[in-house]
Amino acid sequence: MELGNNERRMLRAMLPEPSRAWSLDELLEATGWSDQVHVAGAGAGLAEAGLVEVAEERGRIVSLGDEGAKAVADGLLEARLWDWMSEQKPTERTMAGLSAAFERHEAGPGVGLLKALGIKVEAGALATADEGAVVAGIEQRTSFIQSLADGPLDAASLDAEMVSHFSGRKGLIATEEHVSRSWSLTEAGSSEDESGLEEVELVGDVTPEMLQGDSWRDAKFKPFDVNAPAPVPLGGRPHPMQALIERIRSVFLEMGFSEIEGPYVQSAGWNMDALFIPQSHPARTMQDTFYLSEPEKVEVEDEYLDLWASVHEHGHDTGSRGWGGTFDRDEAQKALLRTHTTVNTIRHIADNPHEPCRVFGIGRVFRQESIDRTHLPEFHQIEGIIHEPDANLPMLISTLKTFYAKMGYPDVRVRPAYFPYTEPSVEVEVLWRGEWMELGGSGIFRPEVTEPLGTEWPVCAWGMGLERLAMLILELDDIRELYQPDLERLRRMPML
């Protein structure tokens, strides 16, 4: 093996004392290096060549934490509590008195520490049968903490019981693993001839200027091992969710759709009533929907309030009987965070009732959900419609199958379902890990939805959760992993 200049220098420094085990500091002094990286690198090269042996010794260093430094200055919590008890008459050593003398965040944990030292709490009073044992225990703990005041110490030189005790108390001590290495010559290393270890000029980079002349012909080149492990360059990349959104966006644009957007804050009228969701529906309660106090109300044009009232109460002229009852106009103008992006497509139809369109949207929606492995209170929804005279259910199904095939899931099926604002309605499922997984709902908007908006054309509509699709593509079992600030986990996720 061809030795580099660093290996030559380190070996030459060690040869005068071939039986010695060299520490890092000793090698830095002998070689004249200031950076331990040189010793580690040259030592690894010499070890690989069989000229040096590397010995490692692992240990722990114990130092004071932030709370430990306060304890050195002010005393341990149990010591201060005991001082207070010592100043009180036995009849005055009560929990009420202790709580009055100390902060709440000290009194509770402090009583637990005192109990561990042998102090009992009986009928609200503090008492001990062996004050000497309490004092000895506190003195032992105080002595341990003060021993760290001058700087970190090796854990092997400290009382293991005390290290264990204070490791379980937040912020009092900090422990750090450390590794010390030593280097010694092997028999082969000791027999090396020092005269052959002179440093030589090695060429590390071949430059265009060098190749224009002949100097490279007699030069010595630094050897490189192309099989040696190298760090993976960690450049910037989009978050997996953002990358997936861009991928979905490009698929819909490729299929001829246009993108629409809308605000997060909506009226209950456009979010619910326009979709023929009854005002008594459970989804409209505060347990499921985020209602706002600022603004508390979003004005809705009287034209739409009149239409929705007519549709909900008796079906207007759509052929429906409606939901009956009396339509609450104030309820329709309550401000909320949108619960689905369908509100955007409904507004688009209302603004363009006689213009054929194929549009989609990807946006955040908000629902009162308990956080677990499959639910979040804030998530993304993919929404789309086909609004044209010949829109029909087969067109809807073929569109969804094409979308999922382009996303890498060719096995798609639909099954009948119920949604308040579509008829017929179908749920979309894809085959994943041998099982069918439901990803969203779809169907044809009911006349009670479309006709009050000024159109009599059929509207194919669908909505699906983006996070659930992301879990499939990224092969995750917990939806919360998508938003955890764990850079290492994010780096391991596949590029989309």
Image (tube, rainbow, N blue to C red):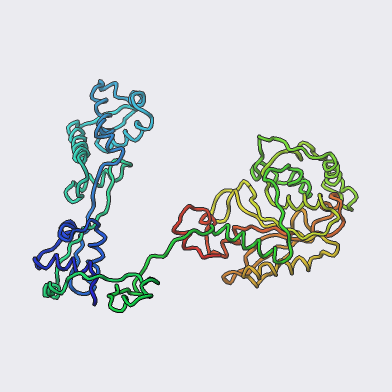
- Locate residue 387, reporting x and y percent: 81, 59
Residue placed furthest toward the front: 213
Question: In the image, is residue 100 above or below residue 18?
Answer: above
- Locate residue 462, reporting x and y percent: 72, 59
Q: Residue at x 70, y 66 (%)?
A: 254
Q: Residue at x 84, y 57 (%)?
A: 355
Residue 176 as seen in the image, left or right of residue 274:
left
Question: In the image, is residue 218 above or below residue 99?
Answer: below
- Locate residue 411, reporting x and y percent: 65, 72
Residue 473 as seen in the image, left or right of residue 353:
left
| Residue 51 seen | yes
Question: In the image, is residue 453 above or below residue 438?
Answer: above
| Residue 460 seen | no
Quadrant including the N terminus: bottom left
Residue 74 as seen in the image, left or right of residue 19:
right
Between 243 and 396, the one lying in front of the other is: 243
Q: Residue at x 33, y 74 (%)?
A: 225
The image quadrant of residue 136 is top left
The image quadrant of residue 177 is bottom left
Residue placed furthest toward the bottom: 217
Total marks drawn?
A: 0
- Locate residue 84, reporting x and y percent: 27, 25
The image quadrant of residue 22 is bottom left
Question: In the image, is residue 101 above or below residue 302?
Answer: above
Quadrant including the C terminus: bottom right
